[in-house]
Image (spheres, rainbow, N blue to C red):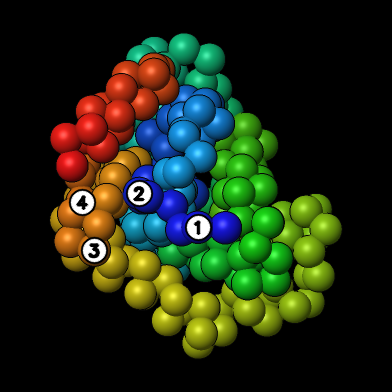
């Protein structure tokens, strides 16, 4: 199989609420991408490791963000019980490492793990900042839980996340979700994220490819 002519890079964090809202449209975008365009995910790492409780002001801000997303993106659901059932921490790197650990055990489990983290967080009021929750999700996906737990915080997993965060920074990405079309070693084009219209993004991609 010949290499793709271009690659669409999706920069995200599994605990980014806007990424959750974008998920259905992203799926449509992936399905409709021309076969000559590759697709890869890149973890941006929204919030580093922390054992400290999330400040009340930030909790209030994030709850307001959830409501705003639900209003802006029809069909997006959030379970606000999370804020009373869990001990929120501003820490998404554990969830990012879970995606890498799952991918290392089975490359086809990357997308299911992302989805499992999102559903646990936004629908089931479970806290993916906790290792125990992440191991449980791996088990629910049919991954070997012991091997997953060993890889979750292993040095190579931490190094892999650091490398993806560094690439995110080199790409100039400052917010999630972000889309970048790579058409060559030094040719990168930001694609404006449309949360409800995959066709609009496909048109932009087609226009860029026609001009390069």
Q: Residue 6 carries which label?
A: 2
Q: Which mark is residue 185?
A: 3
- Outermost residue, bottom direction? 155
102, above or below 154, in the image: above
Residue 197 shows in the view: yes
Q: Nearer the viewer, residue 38 or 111?
A: 38
Question: Comparing marks 3 and 4, which lies closer to the viewer?
Answer: 3
- Quadrant in the rendering for residue 69: top left
Q: What element carries label 3?
A: loop
Q: Which of marks 3 and 1 is nearer the N terminus?
A: 1
How many other residues sit within 10 Å of disc 4, few (<14), some (14-19) or many (≥20)? some
| Quadrant location, the N terminus | bottom right
- Quadrant in the rendering for residue 202: top left
| Quadrant location, the C terminus | top left
138, above or below 117, in the image: below
24, above or below 208, in the image: above
Q: Mark 4 points at which residue?
A: 188
Q: Where is residue 174 in the image (x, y as percent from the top left)?
A: 20, 50
- Outermost residue, front direction? 2
Rounded to the nearest angstrom, the CA distance separating label 2 from label 4 is 10 Å
């Amino acid at each position: 199989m010949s290499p793709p002519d271009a690659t669409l890079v999706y920069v995200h964090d599994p605990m980014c609420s806007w990424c959750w809202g974008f998920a259905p449209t992203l799926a449509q975008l992936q399905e409709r991408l021309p076969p000559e365009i590759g697709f890869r995910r890149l973890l941006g790492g929204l919030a580093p490791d922390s054992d400290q409780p999330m400040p009340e002001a930030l909790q209030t801000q994030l709850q307001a963000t959830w409501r705003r997303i639900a209003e802006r993106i029809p069909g997006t659901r959030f379970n606000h019980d999370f804020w009373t059932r869990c001990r929120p921490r501003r820490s998404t790197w554990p969830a990012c490492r879970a995606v890498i650990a799952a991918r290392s055990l089975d490359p086809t489990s990357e997308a299911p793990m992302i989805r499992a983290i999102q559903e646990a967080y936004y629908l089931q009021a479970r806290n993916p900042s906790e290792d125990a929750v992440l191991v449980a999700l791996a088990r629910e996906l049919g991954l070997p839980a012991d091997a997953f737990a060993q890889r979750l915080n292993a040095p190579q997993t931490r190094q892999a996340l650091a490398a993806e965060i560094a690439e995110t920074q080199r790409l100039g990405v400052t917010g999630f979700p972000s889309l970048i079309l790579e058409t060559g070693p030094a040719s990168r084009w930001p694609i404006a994220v449309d949360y409800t219209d995959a066709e609009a993004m496909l048109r932009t991609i087609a226009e860029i490819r026609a001009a390069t």
